[in-house]
Structures are given as structure tokens and as C-alpha cells.
Amino acid sequence: MEHLTKQQIILLTLLVSFVTSIATGIVTVSLINQAPAGTTNTIERVIEGTVAQALPSSNLAAVGQSGSLASTLTLATETIKKSTVQIEEYGVADSVSGLGVIINSRGTVMTDKSNVAGLNSPAIVYSDGTSYRAAVVESQLNGDLVFLDPLISAQQASSTSFTPVSIASFPKLGETAASLGGTGMNALGIGIVDEIVTSGASSTPFAVSATIDSSKTLPGSPLFDISGNFIGLRTSSLYAASSTQFYLAAPVREAFPK
């Protein structure tokens, strides 16, 4: 060693460190492979939970595709899809203007007013592909919302079933939430609730903000929790005011058409 130069000593140290790292990795992998299944699952859950906490935004979708979070969100998305509809011009293909959600067993839809503003004859396309012309009912809840009633005969009503959303209670800060977007309901935004929005002197929340990419939403896009419960709806005014705000359903659910 005394005959080595400083540069040679540094290179030798790096070589020893490199070899030691490789040996440590080999030993660790070998021990994990030999560990009982229960121990391995515990380690994987700890790693997944740690990464999930560090990535509370849309990157969550990339965490543990076979893990509990991804599986839960997949089920939640399938649940909300059954209650989500497309709004379009009746009889015109590829004319989707936005989304909406079913709020009662009659198939009544709540959506953003801008989705029907430019339509001569609005129609509702349900998740099973059926399409009905719709009557527009102005909302007394909020100037940005409207309700659409499907124009179906009594015979059609008796043989048709709709799946209304299950409305979530008020969300909490830090809660995981997701939105459904895309004209084909093919865009999923994932994030956390990062703001509860109140109005003036009122302490009752009327909207929430979530860390979701604005490109993943449309006017009428639903925000939902990891159980598939409907939290709120994206409206055009909130769309302009904030790229991530959703109008809450919980405060006004009693005013929905029955």
C-alpha cells in the first residue's frame, strides 16, 4: 500500500466499494428468495406503501400494478363508469361534448351546462351504448349545472335499468381521488384532494381541488373516491377558475330530481 500513489489508492477504494455493493445485492436477493411467502409479501407491501406516499399525484398509477392500490382503483373506475354518460348531438356520430353522471333510477343525468349549450337536440349515451334524446331541466342548485331527462316511453322504461351514482360524504384533505375523462371515457386522472373550497362567510364546502392533470378531465367529468363513490363534477366555471376543481355533490344531494 505504501508504494501506491494517491490516485491508485482512490481507484482501489472505488473498486472495493463496487465489488462489495454487488456482493451485498446478490446476498439480499438470495435471502428474499429463500424467505417465507408471508415475509416477502410484507416487504412488498411496505415498499409499495412507502412509494405510494411519496407519489401522491398521477404517478400513483405506475405504482405496483398488481398491488392493492392499482386493483382498488381499477374496481372503482369500473363502478363509476356504469354511472357515467356521454352528452352528444342526437343522431350525430362523434359529437360528444362532455360527460355527466346518472343521479336517480329514472336515468336523470347531471352535467355541466356548457355540454348542452351548443346542441340543437341533446342526447344521452349510457355506458351500455344505448342513446336517448333528452329534455334539459335547468338546475336550481348552481348556474353551471343542468339535468337531462331521457325521453323514453313507458314500455322502454319498464325494460330499462339505470345505475345512479353513490354519492360520497365530504372528502378529506389528502384523500386519494380520481377523475374520468376523455370523450370515450378513456382517460383516468389520479391524485389527492389538496383543497376544500368554501364560499364567503359560509363554512360549508361547495367544491374541492385535486392534484389531477387538467388534460384528464372534461366539463362533466366525475371525481370519485377509491370505492367508486361520486365526489363531485367538473363544471365550466371551475374549469376556468382552477384546472383541478370539482363542484361537490354531497351538499346538494337532497335537491336532486328524484
Image (cartoon, rainbow, N blue to C red):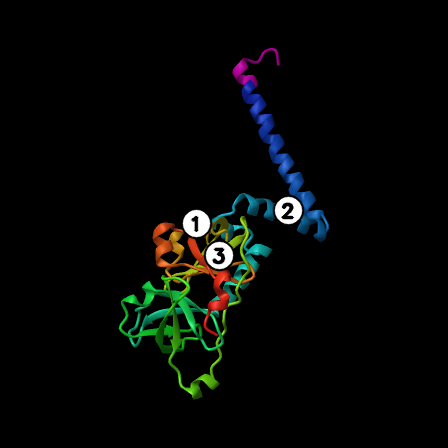
In the depicted view, which residue is nearer to us: 16 or 112? Answer: 112
Q: Which residue is rendered at x = 53% and y = 67% of the image? A: 166
Question: Are circles 3 and 2 on residues that touch, CB within 8 Å?
Answer: no
Residue 200, which numbered label? 1
Residue 241 percent location from the top left of the image: 36, 50
In the depicted view, which residue is nearer to us: 128 or 192? Answer: 192
Residue 223 percent location from the top left of the image: 47, 59
Horizontal side, residue 131 vs residue 201: left or right? left
Q: Amino acid at mark 2?
A: Val
Residue 178, which numbered label? 3
Which element is circle 3 on? strand
Q: Which residues are magenta?
A: 1-9
Report, in whole angstroms, how far the alpha carbon at label 1 lies from the one at label 3. 27 Å
Read off the residue under disc 2: 46
Q: Amino acid at mark 3?
A: Ala
Which element is circle 1 on? loop
Quarter of image, res 66: bottom right
